Amino acid sequence: MKNMKSIRLACTTLALSSVLCVPTYAGQEANTTSEHVTTSSLERKASDAWREGKLDTIYLFNRHLNNFTIDPEVMGTDVVLTGKVESQVDKELAEQLALGVDGVTDVTNRLVVVAPEEARTGRSDGDRELSTKIEDATLTAEVKTRLLANEETDGLDINVDTVRNAVTLSGSVDSSAEKDLAGEIAQQVDGVDGVNNNLMVSES
C-alpha cells in the first residue's frame, strides 16, 4: 500500500513538472524565464519536503528523542528546530542529526529543554506501536508534499502533524479559501482518517 502511495505521488509530481515545462510558442521567449522560475521553485519546495521528511524519520527511529515534540522546518539548506526535549544533550543531538542530513549546512536550534514529563506530552498513551508511528510519519510527509506542490497553498507556512492517522494543520494562510483547500488536500490523502484544521487566516 505504501509503495503504491509513493508511486502515485511520484507520478503526480512528474505530471505536474511536465505541465510546467511545456513551452508556450506564443511569446515563448518571454515565458521561458517564468516557467524556469516556477519549475525551480517547485523543485526547491520538493527538496525541502524531502529533507523535512528525512528529519522526521531520523528523529522517529532515534531512541533518545521523541520526534512528536520536535518540529523541523527546512528552508533550502537551513533548518529551524522548534519544540521540546528532555535535556541539553538531547538538544545538541537533534542539531547534530539535522546537520548530518545531505544538503543541510546550517541549523537554528530553538528547542527548549523541559522536564521529562512535559517533553513526553507528544506521545499518546505512552509508547505507541512502531507501525503506527511509521504510518503517521508517512502521512505527514505525503500531506506536506501535496501542500507544497499545490500552487494555491503556501506549504512552507503550514505545519502538519499526524497522530494515529488524524492530521492536524497549524500555521497561517492568506485566506479562508486557502485554509479550506489545505484541509481538503490533507483529507484526500489515502489513509488519513480525519483533519483538524487549526490554520489561522492572516489579517490583510
Image (spheres, rainbow, N blue to C red):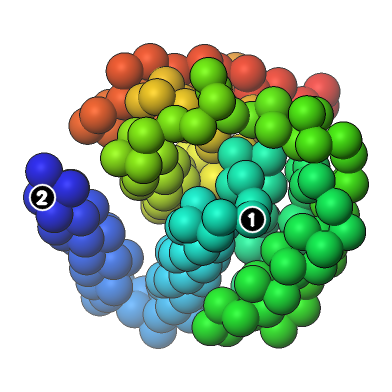
Residue shown at 10%/50% (left/top)?
4
Q: Quadrant of the C terminus?
A: top right
Is residue 85 found left or right of 186 in the rendered image? right
Q: Quadrant of residue 119?
A: top right
Mark 2 = which residue? 4
Q: Quadrant of the N terminus?
A: top left
Residue shown at 85%/52% (left/top)?
87
Residue nearest the observer in this picture, 35 or 112:
112
| Residue 112 position in % (x across, y down) | 88, 46
Mark 1 = which residue? 64
Is residue 6 found left or right of 152 in the rendered image? left
Q: Regarding mark 2 in the picture, which secondary structure is present there?
A: helix
Question: Between tags 2 and 1, which lies in front?
Answer: 1
Is residue 167 found left or right of 98 in the rendered image? left
Is residue 9 found left or right of 40 in the rendered image? left
Q: In the figure, 181 relative to 4: above or below?
A: above
